[in-house]
Amino acid sequence: MLEACHERVLRTLALLARLRTHVQQHGADADARQAARDVLRYFDIAAPLHHQDEELHVFPLLLTHADPEVRALVQRLQEDHVAMAAEWAAARVPLQALAEAAVAPFTPGDEAALDRFARRYAGHIVAEEGTAYPAMQALLAPVALIAMGQEMAARRGA
């Protein structure tokens, strides 16, 4: 489930990239406003739930039982969650403006905020899938992983 969330994050970041290109070429039309709403919805609702899953299930296990290198990575990932929340707060401002009304193309400051957010998120995923998730899987029995996934799904009402 965690990796499936990452796939959705990457698809939404790709949508954000396409949106930015679209706005440069076509302005803030109805398609751009809808795409902005889709990006906002994902990063306002689903992404925080994903971070909560990691904070509840993945990080405590690794901080307690993993080797020192993985523990240091987890601390960085936790810091990323804080930084990503702040970066999202900045990045969502121009997206919200676009979603609510036709506005001029993104300013250079808007573009920089969107770049920072997308870049951090992409690097965060690489670290989690390359190191943190494999370390977690090595520590948990398959039945525990299934139970973890069921709890995550239940939190989402699935």
Image (tube, rainbow, N blue to C red):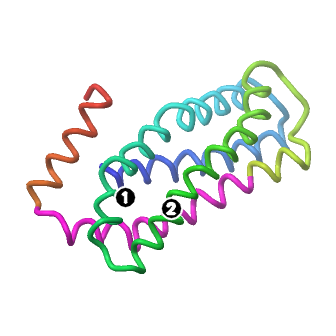
Give the number of the disc on residue 77: 2
Residue 41: percent from left, percent from top: 56, 29
Residue 12: percent from left, percent from top: 55, 45
> In this picture, which residue range is highlighted in magenta?
115-141
Q: Is residue 26 left or right of residue 139?
A: right
Using the image as rendered, state which of residue 12 and residue 143 is in the foreground: 143
Using the image as rendered, state which of residue 52 and residue 96 is in the foreground: 52
Q: Residue furthest front?
A: 64
- Quadrant assignment, res 88: top right
Q: Residue furthest top?
A: 100
The quarter of the rendered structure image containing the C terminus is top left
Label 1, residues with CA under 10 Å away: few <14, some 14-19, many ≥20: many
| Secondary structure found at label 2 | helix
Q: Is residue 116 left or right of residue 123?
A: right
Residue 86: percent from left, percent from top: 68, 44
Label 2, residues with CA under 10 Å away: few <14, some 14-19, many ≥20: many
* Principal secondary structure, stretch drawn in magenta: helix
Q: Is residue 11 part of the magenta span, yes or no?
A: no
Q: Earlier in the sequence, mark 1 or mark 2?
A: 1
| Secondary structure found at label 1 | helix
Point 19% across, 40% down: residue: 150
- Quadrant assignment, res 90: top right
Q: Is residue 118 part of the magenta span, yes or no?
A: yes
Residue 83: percent from left, percent from top: 64, 52
**Amino acid type for the residue under numbered disc 2:** Leu
Relative height, residue 92 to residue 78 (above, below): above
**Amino acid type for the residue under numbered disc 1:** Phe
The residue carrying mark 1 is 59
Point 91% across, 43% down: residue: 107
